[in-house]
Amino acid sequence: MKESLETTYKRIEGWLSPKEAEQLFRLATASTFLEGDIVEIGSWKGKSTVIFGAVCKETGKGKVFAIDPHTGSPEHGDVWTYPEFEKNIKEANLEEYIIPIIKTSQEAAKDWNRPIRLLWIDGNHEFYYVKKDYSLFSPHVVTNGIVAFHDALSSPGVKQVLRDFFFGSNKFKNFRFVENIVYAERTVQVTLKENLENLYAFYLWQLYGIYSILYSKGIFRLPQWCKRFFKFLSGSLK
């Protein structure tokens, strides 16, 4: 990621860590060889949007469809974030590459008929809405395209969708996780080997979640050699 883009996204209010932002940049860049556009469900003020838009601008491939009613989630109270979102997109000189859709995902899905190469789900984190985001838009993701969820560890609603629908799907393989992001690659039909790899990834993610909770509470911290071993286990999935 270029330093200028890093400076741009960091000044925008939002909830992406540096590692998560870098991962989104990599996923967007890796998807440029595929047909389709990037769809973001949940834009807030444009933090992740400018990362996706910068990739589209740099590669000349596709657009970012940023779906958000801009009224926030229940925990945000009565808000209207579109003016600040629009300002951030203009200041980043990305208006040509980002198409705001000021609707809920359910409203936007009624007219949606475009292929998607990267689907980023980061809207309302209640189970009902996360499931709707996933079920309405993931069928449009092309083969080898990516579906990614944010707040995969911190939100019970997201965790339930991942546990009940995503990891168990026969349409996704190569599950990975980076901090609070879980993502996987769309496929036609998973093989037996891929099924086993998905199961392995699921339990590894569960262990990572337990460790994250213990670490955040200061109860338990892994020694350095354990961290290296954990990274080796994650890498062995690749």
Image (cartoon, helix red, strand yellow):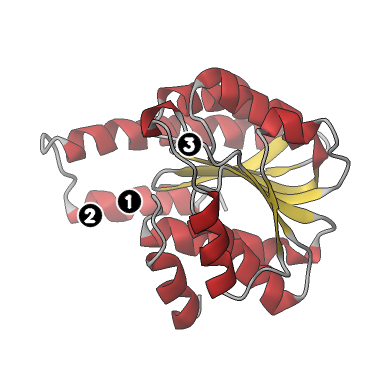
The amino acid type, in three-letter code, at marker 3 is: Gly
Q: Is residue 105 visible?
A: yes
Between 96 and 218, the one nearer to me in the picture: 96
Three-letter residue code for mark 2:
Trp
In the shown orientation, is residue 35 left or right of residue 66?
right
- Image side of residue 33 versus residue 203, left or right: right
Disc marking residue 229:
1
Badge 3 local density, few (<14 within 10 Å), some, or many (20+)?
Answer: some
Disc sitting over residue 225 in the figure:
2
Q: Amino acid at mark 1?
A: Phe
Local crowd size for mark 2, using a 10 Å CA cut-off: few (<14), some (14–19), many (≥20): few
Mark positioned earlier in the residue sequence (1 or 3): 3
Q: Is residue 153 above or below residue 181?
A: above
Residue at point 71%, 28% (across, down)? 106
Q: Is residue 170 visible?
A: no
- Distance Cα–Cα, label 1 vs label 3: 40 Å
Q: Which one is in front, 72 or 179?
A: 72
Q: Which badge, 2 or 3, is on the more N-terminal residue? A: 3
Circle 2: element type: helix
Q: Position of residue 114 (x, y in %)?
A: 86, 46
Q: Which mark is residue 121?
A: none
What kind of element bears circle 1? helix
User: Residue 94: image x %, image y %?
Assistant: 64, 71
Per the image, the residue denoted by label 3 is 72
Q: Is residue 97 left or right of residue 201?
A: right
The answer to whether the residue labelled 2 contacts the one labelled 1, judged by CB atoms less than 8 Å apart, is yes
Picture quadrant of residue 76: top left
Tell us which disc is closer to us: 2 or 3: 3
Q: Secondary structure at mark 3?
A: loop
User: How many numbered marks does the figure carry?
Assistant: 3
Q: CA distance from mark 2 to mark 3?
A: 42 Å
Tell me residue 13's x, y (percent): 39, 56
